[in-house]
DNA sequence: CGAGATTCATGTGAAGTATACCTTTAGGCTTAA
DNA sequence: AAGCCTAAAGGTATACTTCACATGAATCTCGTA
């Protein structure tokens, strides 16, 4: 009976017309041919980078703007164009893109430089080498030829926040170490005031040119969504008003186009799953929930055990109104005993709580209770259904 | 009553430690001349 | 004697611990009105 039902469902699924024509157009890493409302910035970047096509070192460049304002996309777009031309003319131009935020890949100085070397096809061990040794390897490998290298460091503010600004200083010195090759740097930052907090000398040499990407407004977002959905969805699959709603949602989130596109894509998937002929406005709402839920679950599962244990301890306390670090630590210790883990110190848990806050899993506010000390007051604001979900996942992850 | 001292619970920075991993080097074994 | 393998020595990055000091408002203390 049930088996039959499933077969029927599959059959129906196959006969049903898919709503998508080209789903990958809506995926985050897709680079479209044209980027609406960023013509000005693209032109600027192109002007600044143009000398590289004559193998002259272009100015270092810094790009600012909130997430989803097209920074990465614009840079990638231009990179592709330039690499095409370089290839056609046999120019030794190389553009390397690294996202500094990715944990375990480029979130420390050592790992960043190691990753750069890896881009040239040489393996570097995850630990063990002196950092300057890795720098040397990098210099050697780069300096073998008269080439020009453009280094794109995405979300560099995260890296500097975590490890201090010495890295930037080292990077400004790269060119003086090189004989043949030349390197210029494009830094991308989500944090607008980030550059003001670094050493002024570094600032002047690293940020010779600056460019700000303002957030998109709702109308611009609509254009973007329309352009992409036209190519991605079959005609007439989007109910009127869907695009507007989607743009409105994203505009509320500081004009994040990436979010808008994800929203419409997930909405489409949900509609398809429902067997609906069209993407309805309701699908946008469910898509928003689903994205948030998926993101949180993703974050939870990708954390190390100790983070998960801490998170679970917090969730155990969640029904109480005021949660303080001390309470969490007590629960956490019991939990560790139960699952046979060696508990970390309170010092470390304090840091972990701060990181969970950064990840958006919890809200931790530093408060002073006067005579009764100072602590973080933690609140969890997960939708209750998601919270249950996460609890179950954590239970499983922790082996309970 | 109010200014200043005290206090609590934990935040936070710096330095130290454990672990995992790396390269180098010395010694031992094998092999070929 | 040369070549190859192995294990020890010496070195590093990272995650965590230890130590010590910093915080900041509720509460306490004590001089003063």
Image (spheres, coloured by chain):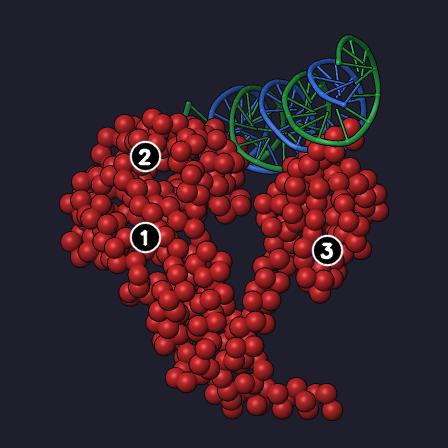
Chain colours: A red, B blue, C green
Q: Position of residue B24 (x, y in %)?
A: 47, 25
How far apart are the two marked residues, 1 and 3, measured between alpha carbons?
A: 39 Å
Label disc, if present, on residue A206 of the rendered structure:
2
Looking at the rendered structure, the secondary structure element under dot 2 is helix
Callout 1: 10 Å neighbours few (<14), some, many (20+)? many
- Upstream in the sequence, badge 1 or badge 3? 1
Q: Is residue C29 above or below residue A368?
A: above
Callout 2: 10 Å neighbours few (<14), some, many (20+)? many
How far apart are the two marked residues, 2 and 1, measured between alpha carbons?
A: 17 Å
User: Which of the 4 image quarters holds residue A299?
Assistant: bottom right
Tell me the quadrant of the picture where the N terminus of chain A can be found: bottom right
- Per the image, the residue denoted by label 3 is A394
Give yes or no for contact between labels 2 and 1 (Cβ–Cβ under 8 Å): no
How far apart are the two marked residues, 3 and 2, measured between alpha carbons?
A: 43 Å
Q: Position of residue B22 (x, y in %)?
A: 51, 34
- Per the image, the residue denoted by label 1 is A75
Q: Mark 1 belongs to which subunit?
A: A
Q: Is residue A375 above or below residue A6?
A: above
């Amino acid at each position: 009976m049930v088996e039959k039902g499933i077969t029927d469902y599959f059959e129906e699924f196959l006969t049903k017309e898919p709503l998508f024509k080209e789903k990958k157009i809506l995926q985050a890493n897709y680079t479209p041919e044209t980027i609406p409302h960023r013509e000005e910035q693209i032109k600027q970047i192109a002007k600044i980078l143009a000398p590289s096509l004559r193998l002259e070192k272009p100015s270092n460049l810094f790009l600012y703007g909130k997430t989803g304002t097209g920074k990465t996309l614009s840079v990638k777009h231009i990179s592709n164009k330039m690499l095409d031309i370089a290839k056609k003319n046999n120019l030794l131009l190389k553009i390397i893109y690294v996202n500094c935020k990715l944990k375990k890949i480029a979130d420390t100085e050592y790992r960043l430089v190691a990753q750069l070397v890896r881009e040239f096809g040489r393996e570097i061990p995850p630990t063990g080498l002196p950092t300057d040794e890795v720098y040397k390897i990098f210099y050697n490998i780069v300096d073998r030829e008269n080439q020009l290298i453009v280094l794109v460091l995405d979300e560099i503010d995260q890296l500097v926040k975590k490890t201090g600004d010495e890295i930037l200083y080292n990077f400004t010195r790269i060119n003086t170490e090189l004989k043949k090759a030349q390197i210029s740097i494009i830094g991308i930052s989500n944090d607008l005031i980030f550059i003001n907090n670094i050493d002024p000398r570094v600032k002047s040499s690293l940020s010779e040119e600056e460019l700000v990407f303002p957030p998109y407004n709702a109308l611009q977002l609509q254009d973007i969504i329309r352009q992409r959905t036209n190519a991605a969805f079959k005609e007439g699959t989007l109910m009127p008003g869907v695009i507007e709603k989607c743009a409105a949602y994203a505009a509320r989130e500081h004009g994040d186009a990436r979010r808008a596109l994800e929203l419409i894509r997930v909405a489409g998937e949900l509609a398809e799953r429902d067997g609906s002929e069209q993407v309805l406005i309701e699908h946008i709402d469910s898509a928003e929930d689903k994205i948030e839920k998926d993101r949180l679950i993703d974050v939870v599962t990708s954390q190390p055990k100790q983070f998960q244990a801490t998170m679970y301890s917090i969730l155990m306390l969640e029904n109480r109104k005021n949660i303080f670090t001390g309470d969490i630590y007590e629960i956490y210790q019991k939990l560790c005993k139960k699952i046979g883990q060696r508990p970390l110190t309170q010092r470390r848990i304090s840091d972990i709580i701060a990181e969970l806050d950064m990840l958006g899993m919890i809200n931790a506010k530093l408060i002073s209770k006067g005579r009764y000390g100072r602590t973080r007051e933690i609140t969890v604001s997960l939708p209750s259904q998601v919270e249950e979900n996460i609890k179950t996942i954590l239970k499983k992850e922790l082996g309970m």
